[in-house]
Image (cartoon, rainbow, N blue to C red):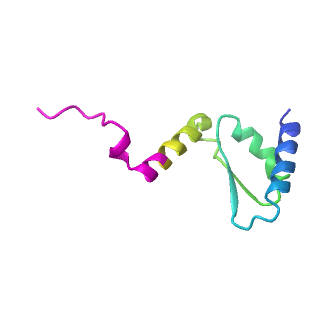
Amino acid sequence: MYTHVASTIASNLNRLWKNDWDIDSIIVSGGGSIPLAEFLISSVEGNVIPIPKSIDARFNNVRGYCKFGHYQWGKDKTIPSRQAPAA
């Protein structure tokens, strides 16, 4: 199954990003990324960076979007603080 999925993803990446010089590397992230990355590395024309096997990759995408939101809109502007109110 991973071979088929990786082949489909790789052919789309290679076709869509063929002339895009802004992309230096592809970071494979998320729940099934660790086993899938092993199949993508040999199929994608470019640098594929897998998440280390020692990291729980299931929430990487959510954490990344949260970090981007903090960067884009500022942590204190949109996310309520979890600190206890001052006495």
Task: Please name whichever residue, 25 or 20, is drawn nearer the observer in this view of the structure.
Answer: 20
Q: Measuring 64% from the left and 46% from the top, which residue is drawn there? A: 51
* Stretch in magenta: 69-87
What percent of the width, then of the height, locates residue 73?
A: 42, 49
Of the 4 image quadrants, the one containing the C terminus is top left
Pick out the residue farthest to the left. Answer: 87
In the foreground, 87 or 17: 17
Image spot of residue 29 (x, y percent): 65, 43
Query: What residue sits 58% from the left and 36% below the top?
Result: 56
Whether 79 is among the magenta residues is yes
Percent across and percent down for residue 47 are 74, 60
Q: Nearer the viewer, residue 85 or 20?
A: 20
Q: Is residue 81 left or right of residue 32?
A: left
Residue 43 drawn above or below residue 21: above
**Quadrant of the drawing holding the N terminus:** top right
**Residue 17 appears in which quarter of the rendering?**
bottom right
The count of marks equals 0
Say if the magenta span includes residue 72: yes
Instruction: Please identify the quarter of the rendering in which residue 84 is found.
Output: top left
Q: Position of residue 79 (x, y in %)?
A: 37, 38
Q: Is residue 73 above or below residue 57?
A: below
When asked about the image quadrant of residue 53, the answer is top right
